[in-house]
Image (cartoon, grey):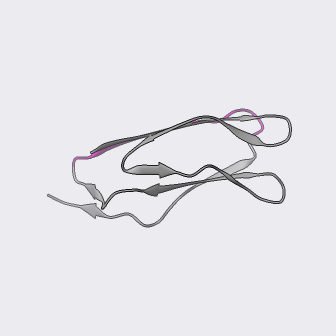
Amino acid sequence: MNGRLSLSTAFDGQKTVTEDLYFAPPFKVYSPFYDHKGWAKYISMCGSAGVLAGDENEIKLFVGGKLQGHFHRSGLSKAFQH
């Protein structure tokens, strides 16, 4: 499986907003949650049974100026050897 994740953000003067978000398995990214300060929290998780040896995954994060946010990866993923 060849997964892709692309996230582009910008600051609108009050908070970080998503400009563009694209993902393909095994990635899954939720719309951001905002804390009491307006900081965005993006969470990525593995949406498949696991990652096999030889799989190629690509992650691109384009962050605008004055980013107020966090990007977290879920710790629940499996890696398998052939």
Q: Position of residue 53 (x, y in %)?
A: 22, 53
Q: Position of residue 12 (x, y in %)?
A: 80, 34
Q: Residue furthest left?
A: 82
**Left or right: 67 in relation to 79:** right
Q: Position of residue 56 (x, y in %)?
A: 30, 42
Q: Which residue shows up at 84% across the image and 55% down it? A: 37
With respect to residue 61, does 42 lie above or below? below
Q: Which residue shows up at 81% across the image and 51% down it? A: 38
Q: Residue furthest bottom?
A: 76
Region of the chain picked out in magenta, as a range: 54-66
Q: Position of residue 29 (x, y in %)?
A: 52, 50
**Left or right: 69 in relation to 73:** right
**Left or right: 6 in relation to 10:** left
**Left or right: 37 in relation to 30:** right
Name the image quarter holding the C terminus.
Answer: bottom left
Front-lying residue, 58 or 32: 32
Q: Indicate whether residue 45 is drawn in magenta.
A: no
With respect to residue 40, does 16 lie above or below? above
Q: How many marks?
A: 0
Name the image quarter holding the N terminus.
Answer: top left
With respect to residue 36, does 20 lie above or below? above
Q: Which residue shows up at 30% across the image and 61% down it? A: 49
